[in-house]
Image: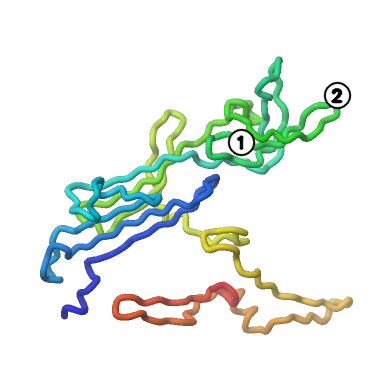
Amino acid sequence: SFLSGVGKHSQETRWVVEIVGKPEPVDVCVAVDNVAGGSCVRSPRSPQVHVTARGKQVFPGDSKESAVLRQDFQWRWPYRGGIRGLQMPGVYEVRPEHAVQEHWFSATLTGQMEDGCFKAMVDYPTGEGKFKTIEFPVVKVENIREKRTHQHLVLPTCEIVLDVPLANPLHPTLSACHKNGLGQTTEGVLLTHFFARRSPPPQKGLLGPPKREPRVKFEVSKDRKIIICDTGYQDLSHFQSSEVRAIQRNSDGRLKKWWKLQIGPFAE
């Protein structure tokens, strides 16, 4: 029937990606209308495609709202990747930029900035074998090296790559790749491979401040024979099994449905 085919060939795919060191997430959206030029749902014509990335329209390149794909479309966005060892003491050394002689001092890199510089807490000598921790608000990457190997720090260059295939624009993919030490770009990895549940949740994430973390309280007697818990056996058993349960389902009209799932006794 006509109603069963409505929406079958139209789709919006959206990614919101948080990147370490970036103040704002990257928003990428691909909208495809595969029946815009046809009169029959069962016989779709050339798809109309509209692509936005980071708040700007990237396809089509002119002022049109959407256009027909003539070839595979690809959008690439380069960015500086995060480094290992951030906030870890004893991993790096820092060289003061305006020192008369070259000296390297043990440091803890505390932050990575948009321009590729770093913030650091440096153990600076004060004489008689004593050191004082001094904050360096801006340290250029050429003044940082690994403490163990004495190799200069190299910032990884990464890219987010969007591919919209001409053969099937309803299945776009978003991947991440990086350049190695020879400047060669490695094969991209689909962003779906990076999906994970952060624990503990971030203080400020894409969805705002997290809810208060649920806790289970146990009280043990001094002789360790009696344990009192503020929750029941069902919650503890559910936590141990991590069973996924559907607790709510609804539909908004004919074209939209949503489900609410529970993983364990507290996570929804």
Residue 62 lies, in percent from the top left, at 24, 46
Characterize the local packing of mark 1: few (<14), some (14-19) or many (20 or more) Cα atoms within 10 angstroms.
many
Q: Amino acid at mark 1?
A: Phe
Circle 1 SS class: strand
Q: Earlier in the sequence, mark 2 or mark 1?
A: 1
Three-letter residue code for mark 2: Gly
Q: Which quarter of the image is occupied by the N terminus?
A: bottom left
Q: Quadrant of residue 258?
A: bottom left
Q: Residue at x 76, y 76 (%)?
A: 218
Q: Please rate how many residues cluster around mark 2, counting C-alpha atoms within 10 Å: few if below 14, some from 14 to 19, many from 20.
A: few
Residue 79 in the image: state x and y as whole percent: 45, 40
- Provide residue 88's location: percent of width, then percent of height: 68, 42
Residue 129 horizontal/vertical position (percent): 86, 26
Q: Quick check: 256 left or right of 87?
A: left
Residue 127 is marked as 2
Instruction: Determine whether the residue tagged by mark 2 lies in a helix, strand or loop.
Output: strand
- Indicate left or right for 215 with 265 as reference: right
Q: Quadrant of the rendered structure where residue 124 is?
A: top right
Q: Please state which of residues 2 and 259 is positioned toward the viewer in this rendering.
A: 2
Identify residue for label 1: 118
